[in-house]
Image (tube, helix red, strand yellow):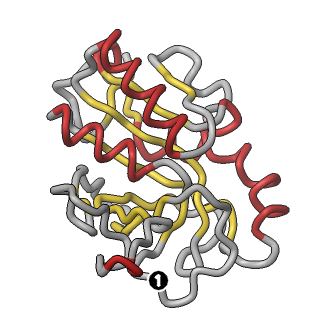
Amino acid sequence: MMLIKQFPDISLADTLFVFALEAEAGEVFSEVRTVFTGIGKVNAAIALTRAIQQQRPKLIVNLGSAGSQRHGKGEVVCCTRFVQRDMDVTPLGFARYETPLSNIPVLLEHGQAIPGLPVEICGSGDSFEVNHGDAPYDVVDMEAYVFALIAREEGIPFVCLKYISDDAGSDAAGDWAVQVHLAAEAFKRVLFTQVG
């Protein structure tokens, strides 16, 4: 029987694995409960909310590809803090990344660190970022912020692992297309242990 190393008390049947795309899961995750949300924050919010209502998981694990200028291609990092990188209402006097008139902090914290993995801040937004300069995040994706926020609001433990597929630079799109198919095996090595 397979279990997630860091959560031996939560069965795979009670765990929901959340991916944006099937390419990120490959065949590795075909025997567990998965949801494929599609790309972007709106699709992510709709699909995860529906899945939680139907399945009531005890653990949500977001696995996906991401860009990073700090980490090399093929590395797996754990994200426990999140920024909505495309939220910018500064002309109205709000801080950059702040969601106006909400109680959501600019830096959303929700998630379990995985021993042995770098712990980073993920900047999520509805764009394929190719130049994030000196932004306050180390990893970029298009959905994780939403997954973390929903898991927090629902009181569900959350793990977010990102497979670095590109450097969020000028070659990011080409690198992503090659690397995304390698993500599932990397996640399997990090997450699962055989028991019994």
Residue 139 falls left or right of residue 175: left
Position of the C terminus, as image quadrant, is top left
Please state which of residues 115 and 178 is positioned toward the viewer in this rendering.
Answer: 178
- Residue 178, image x, y percentages: 81, 54
Q: Residue at x 37, y 71 (%)?
A: 97
Number of numbered discs on residues: 1
- Residue 55, image x, y percentages: 33, 12
Which residue position is annotated with label 1?
Answer: 135
Residue 25 falls left or right of residue 92: right
Position of the N terminus, as image quadrant, is top left
Q: Can I make out residue 196 in this image?
A: no
Q: Residue at x 63, y 46 (%)?
A: 183
Q: In this picture, is 151 found above or below 12?
A: below
Q: Quadrant of residue 89?
A: bottom left
Q: Quadrant of residue 59?
A: top left
Query: For the residue carrying disc 1, how many other residues have a C-alpha within 10 Å: few (<14), some (14-19), or many (20+)?
Result: few
Residue type of the residue flagged with mark 1: Ala
In the rendered image, the residue lying farthest to the right is: 174
- Residue 168, image x, y percentages: 66, 73
Question: For the residue labelled by badge 1, is the local secondary structure a helix, a strand or a loop?
Answer: loop
Q: Residue at x 47, y 32 (%)?
A: 18
Residue 124 falls left or right of residue 175: left
In the rendered image, the residue lying farthest to the front is: 92
- Residue 10, image x, y percentages: 21, 24
Q: In this picture, is 119 found above or below 14?
A: below
Q: Can I make out residue 60 in this image?
A: yes
In the rendered image, the residue lying farthest to the bottom is: 134
Please state which of residues 41 and 89 is positioned toward the viewer in this rendering.
Answer: 89
Please state which of residues 97 and 171 is positioned toward the viewer in this rendering.
Answer: 97
Q: Residue at x 60, y 52 (%)?
A: 65
